[in-house]
Every structure is written in C-alpha cells, then in structure tokens.
Amino acid sequence: MKTTKKGLPYEMTITKDCIHFIFDDDTSVFVDHDDLSVYDMDGMMTIPAHKQEVVDKEIAMLKLLIR
C-alpha cells in the first residue's frame, strides 16, 4: 500500500470505466478514462491538495507506461 505525503495510505484500482483511488480515511477519488476528469464520491470535482498530488503522480506514471 502506498501513502500520500501526509502519510495517508491509499490503493489504486483500474476498472473499465475509471481509475479508482481508495484512501484509508474512507474516501475515494475517481479519474474518468475518457477525459481524465477527477471527482470524489459525491461527484465534486475539487479534492484536497494532498490527494490531487497522488492522482497527478499516478496518472503521470501511467502515461509513461502507455508510451
């Protein structure tokens, strides 16, 4: 299990519809495959900065793997 800079553990799962980040504080963040839009469990497009850093880092690494 990986952790954010603030020490919050998380897991990343890739599904057919999205990339799902599950954080240890019982929250989730989703990234849509089509347009890479980011949203939380309530459909809000704004997520905390430390979670956004995780999403940005993981998406960047996935883009490198796809090349």
Image (cartoon, grey):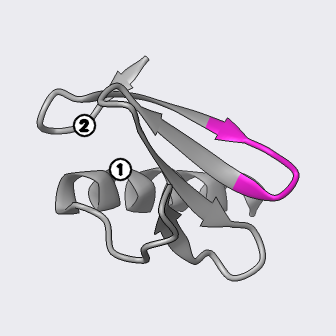
Query: Residue 50, percent across and down?
Result: 20, 53
Q: Residue under label 1, please give it.
A: 54
Query: Residue 28, percent across and down?
Result: 47, 45
Which corner quadrant of the image does residue 31 belong to?
bottom right
Residue lying furthest right: 16
Please say if the residues under marks 2 and 1 sit with CB atoms less than 8 Å apart.
yes
Characterize the local packing of mark 2: few (<14), some (14-19) or many (20 or more) Cα atoms within 10 angstroms.
Answer: some
Q: Amino acid at mark 2?
A: Thr
Comparing 60 with 38, the one in front is 38
* In the image, residue 66 lies in the stretch drawn in magenta: no
Residue lying furthest left: 6
Q: Secondary structure at mark 1?
A: helix
Q: Secondary structure at mark 2?
A: loop
Q: Is residue 2 above or below residue 33?
A: above
Q: Which residues are magenta?
A: 13-18
User: What is the CA distance from the residue labelled 2 to the residue labelled 1?
Assistant: 6 Å
The residue under the point 48% across, 63% down is 42
Q: Is residue 64 above or below residue 27?
A: below
Q: Is residue 6 above or below residue 49?
A: above
Which corner quadrant of the image does residue 12 belong to?
top right
Comparing 42 with 25, the one in front is 42
Query: Residue 37, percent across and down?
Result: 57, 77
Mark toward the start of the polypeptide (2 vs 1):
2
Q: Amino acid at mark 1?
A: Val
Q: Residue under label 2, please give it.
A: 4
Which corner quadrant of the image does residue 34 belong to?
bottom right
Q: Is residue 37 left or right of residue 18?
A: left
Comparing 41 with 65, the one in front is 41
Q: Is residue 4 above or below residue 60?
A: above
Residue lying furthest bottom: 35
* In the image, residue 15 lies in the stretch drawn in magenta: yes
Rendered-image quadrant of the N terminus = top left
